Image: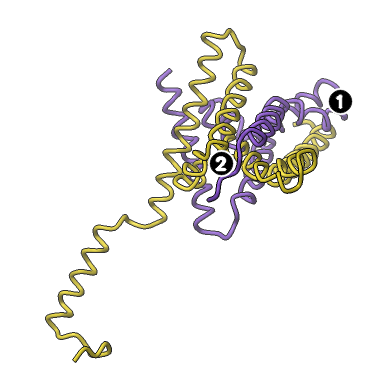
Chain colours: A yellow, B purple
Amino acid sequence: MFDKNAKPSPRRQQQLDRYKQLVERMSPNSDMGKGLLRAFWVGGTICTLGQALQEIGKAWLGMNNTAASTFCSTVLVFLTALLTGLGVWDKIGQYAGAGAFVPISGFANAMVSPAMEFRREGLVLGLGAKLFTIAGPVLVWGVSASVIVGIIYAIWPW
Amino acid sequence: MLWSFVKAFALGGALCAIGEFLVLKTKLTPARILVGYIVAGVILSATGLYGPLAEFAGAGATVPLTGFGHALTNGVKKAVQEIGFMGAFTGGLTSTAAGIAAAVFFGALAAMVFKPRPK
């Protein structure tokens, strides 16, 4: 009686089709659209916070452009390190994906997060090495690329 | 001032959305995308494409990691103008020193103070 392979009756099939359409209409467009939107608004918010920090540095703390920009990265790095330690950043990261790791805050998180697991290898070597699990490659390739640019620029300034 | 926030939000958000697109469409891990963003920032800056973006969007261009690459290139070019060839080696880290030192210091501090929690 409950043969799973039996074809549903036309009426039942109609119900099933309608249900499928309903599910498609109700569920979010696609994981892609949702992911992009989340990354966009969280990443945009972090950058806006950075812009606010720069304006604060310039307007109230008497900083020039360079100092204000440094102030902005330093505060963002500090906040991310704190939130990572408190376990809050993990949740932001899960929600926002690239929105959390593309800004400079992601760089700070990529340092703190592995480093918190240092206890097995000890303070001096474990913490020291694990801070650079992800930051190491980023610095190696970034600095190397910039040295190449610098050498080319020294020979043919454009 | 409000307009500068809108610009920062739009460009910063767009750069993050591109990163998310890469996560979803390719098998690149976040760590590789970070490396890619820095190197892309260095190259875009060297070819003169990133400068106008940074001028336009402020923190929207400098806070994402491409901005880190842009700072590396800017520093290198400035140092080469000032001290010649050896500037290729001093400029990048000079201009990014604060960000790196802050990340190292606060990172080490946070890792020592907080205990990892089970996920």
Q: Which residue is mark 1?
A: B84
Q: Is residue B40 above or below residue A71?
A: below
Looking at the rendered structure, the kind of residue marked 1 is Gly
Q: Is residue A58 above or below residue B91?
A: above
Position of the C terminus of chain A, as image quadrant, is top right
Regarding mark 2 in the picture, which secondary structure is present there? loop
Q: Is residue A136 toward the left or the right of residue B58 in the image?
A: right
In space, the residues marked 2 and 1 are separated at their CA atoms by 33 Å
Q: Quadrant of residue B34?
A: top right
Q: Quadrant of residue A16?
A: bottom left
**Residue A103, which numbered label?**
none
Residue situated furthest left in the rendering: A11
Chain letter for mark 1, please: B
Regarding mark 1 in the picture, which secondary structure is present there? helix
A18 or B87, nearer to the observer: A18
Q: Quadrant of residue B75?
A: top right
Q: Which residue is mark 2?
A: A102
Position of the N terminus of chain A, as image quadrant, is bottom left
Residue A65: x and y in percent read 61, 16
* Residue drawn at the location 50% of the way across and 35% of the way down: B12
Q: Is residue B88 toward the left or the right of residue B69 in the image?
A: right
B45 or B4, nearer to the observer: B4
A1 or A11, nearer to the observer: A1
* Residue drawn at the location 56% of the way across and 31% of the way down: A82
A89 or A37, nearer to the observer: A89
Residue B49: x and y in percent read 61, 36
Chain letter for mark 2, please: A
Looking at the rendered structure, the kind of residue marked 2 is Val
Residue B15: x and y in percent read 52, 41
